[in-house]
Amino acid sequence: MYEVKMRNYTMIPYTNRRYLDAVLDHVVLFDGATGTQLARTALTADDFGGERTAGLNEMLLFHRPEVVQAAHAAYLEVGAEAIETNTFRANRLTLAEFGVAERTLEINRRAAQLAREVADRYAAETGLPRFVAGSMGPTGQLPSLDDPELSIATFAELAAVYAEQAQGLLEGGVDLLLLETQQDLLELKAAIHGIWQTFTALDARVPIQAQVTLDASGHMLTGPDAAAAVAALAALPVDLIGLNCSTGPEEMRAAVRQMLALAGRPASVLPNAGMPENVDGQAVYTLQPAPFALALGEFAAWGVCAVGGCCGTGPEHIAALRAQLDARAVETEARFAPTAIPYLASNVQAVALHQEPRPLIIGERINTQGSRQARRLVLERRYDALVALVETQVGYGAHVLDLCVALTERDDEADTMREIVKRLALASPAPLAFDTTDPAVMRAALESYPGRAILNSVNLEGGEARAREILGLAREFGAALIALTIDEEGMAKTVARKLEIARRLYALAVDDLGLPPHALIFDPLTFTLATGDVETAGAAVATLEALHRIKAELPGALTNLGVSNVSYGLTPPARRVLNSVFLYQAVEAGLDMAIVNPAQITPYADIPAEERALAEALIFNRHPDALAAYIAHFEGLTEAPESVSETALSPSEQLRQAILRRRREGVEALVEASLAERAPLAVLNEVLLPAMKEVGERFGAGELILPFVLQSAEVMKAAVGQLEHHLERAEGVSKGVVVLATVFGDVHDIGKNLVKTILVNNGYTVHDLGKQVPVAEILETAQQVGADAIGLSALLVATSQQMRVAVEELQRRGLEIPLLVGGAAINVEFARRIGAGYAPGVHYCKDAFDALRVLEAL
């Protein structure tokens, strides 16, 4: 039976899990908008207790309780199973605006009691369970931002506000606590903390249903998209994850799909009655009950376990939805993954811990202990320049950023961390790893960060008590951890010792404290091979073997290495080659992520064979003179030599090499020189496109990591930009109109850009929507421009599912537009599978030329 067991602050058993059992049995129907129903009664200021509290619906609990109970009854009468308490604004901060903050406990207790009375009466009359959801709305604070008025409440203060409200609701008898219309991830995290403080204090526990609100573009008010919000919530101890308010069901479609894919637990959806329309200064909701119910019935068929209505919905909407659910008879068994998919989240987007191909890159250049530039910027408090450094790392392909702010010159690490985290959370799409040894600094960082981060790191050097403290922080905030193989005896050098410590940490974290296995990222330690010490000559071999054994013996756990440690003490050219070869071998051994500067790594296949052999002899300790031979080879070099003398190459071949070797400088001049050898279209078709195709093939074969591909793409863009001055489009009318996009959740657009170039220069009109484009936007554009075909690109397996959604949406909207799909994650079988039954066809295109051939055939 499903139960949230992971990351609970304490293992408090449910004292009431009736509601959770119900959502596991069938789709539970919530009520509609409480405020909408209350507004149907003519009310005066006296009904709210006077002018000061006029409009505060919570005051009706004392002055017109029968009106509140009648609103509850109206929904139960038409088949609702769960009703929300009239406490949406009943938190101390909001109530203080009306001068009644001191009545917070009383208001929440009273609201729960009144709802309980009505629910129990209907349960007795019908013999069916009825549930009371304790409504907990936002406070009006936006702690993720840096606003002098809206971001003044601290994490601890917000947690206390929600703890107090939860207490009143629990004492009044609610079956669940419903955090709804949440607009700021950091406030939502504080609210969950506060609720668990109350669970602990009262030794009581009910399910938590946490719902965020997204705008029509699919983002929370403070920035996170649906995937980031769900990924952050999925790491926290909540029982249901959901969406409500802001939009109608149609605008939620893409977000609902993402939520079901990422939540790892039951999901809820409570939309408005469509998008609000401004009529004489009033918000009017026009979506009628029938289409509202039809859309939510479809969501239930997808796997949503709880549905209902928000603003603008009334008993008529819930009655229609009751009929829809009864007609569908949707069961919820096995409709969600029992274990959350391992993702990190920034305040912008989610990032999968499992990258395809490996590894996930953790950028190391904003670490004051490893980067002189970062150290200087933090010391001088030049935080804007630090943000620029972050942008450079992300541009090079870093998925996550390792942040360390420790300085021997200052003793304000916690305050500095808090300030920098706030800035980076608003500026960086990449999630953060907090690199510190101080649990107080870790807490400061976690209380300032909206998303799901990594703690770097935990070990057993200080014994299990200290490790428990750090593991407890990870559990409390839903963070992942880098776990170092260090114990009371020091750093593990042998494979056996590395495994022994990893097993201890795994047992402590997973078996004892309830962390999910994928929250643990084991670093079996990398030691330099530059000492010449016989005892450390086999260190790299031990590390590689430990990586393999950890992956095999500790199910679900991930692995990481600080790659550059292997070359410490060598010259820069020697370090670059050794780091690059070691990274390649580590990935082969099972490495999931690496702390590395991507700009200082060379693709394995680009390293001269002689240097690869020398590096591998050193790494695998193949002979006693391996280190001496390696050092001798690089002695006197200031940079790594090239394997090919390029001065004798033709301009076209130099241009090709520029793309393959990611050399942006001077590429425009190479394009111009190549035009002396061949026609513009020949430069494109015979030099540039084959070069990028080779890059793509090497990426697919695992020879290149993603940062290298992105860098090659930047060179390609510059070259094509220069070449376009010389290209002429085919004469005559357009051959057809094509809409191109990289699917939502995917930031890679290399293949799509190549397709655009080919199609435009062969007479097609192309509307390029860019990357991370929601399906709804793609289809709406296609309709607007009268598209003859749609082309979708995806690099990752996870994001390729958006193509399936596109086919379903095309069919639902009655559109007959051929769909072209391509990318590293796509193959002909996938296209055939998702296109089954779609008459216009789903056509797999293995490259840009294939896309042209498909369109010509169509």
Image (tube, grey):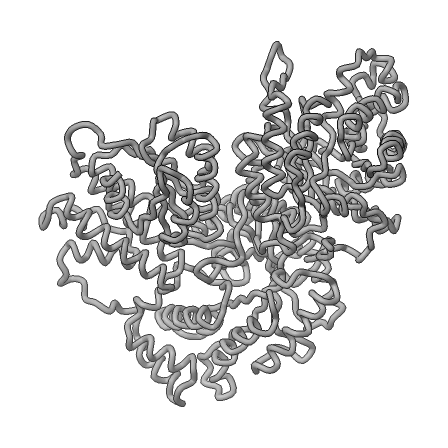
Q: Nearer the viewer, residue 578 or 274?
A: 274
Q: Residue at x 82, y 37 (%)?
A: 128
Where residue 37 sits, quadrant-wise, is top right
Q: Quadrant of residue 519?
A: bottom right
Drawn side of residue 605 relative to residue 256, left or right: left
Indicate left or right for 379 with 86 as reference: left
Q: Residue at x 49, y 69 (%)?
A: 590
Q: Is residue 738 above or below residue 464?
A: above
User: Is 68 left, or right, of 643 in this rendering?
Assistant: right
Q: Toward the viewer: 778 or 644?
A: 778
Q: Is residue 229 visible?
A: no
| Residue 653 image offset from top left, x and y in percent | 17, 57
Q: Nearer the viewer, residue 373 or 422?
A: 422
- The image quadrant where one finds the N terminus is bottom right
Say if 527 sits above or below 14 in the image: below
Vertical side of 191 occupied by 641: above or below:
below
Residue found at x 67% / y 76%: 487
Residue 382, image x and y in percent?
Answer: 52, 47
Q: Position of residue 858 (x, y in %)?
A: 26, 38
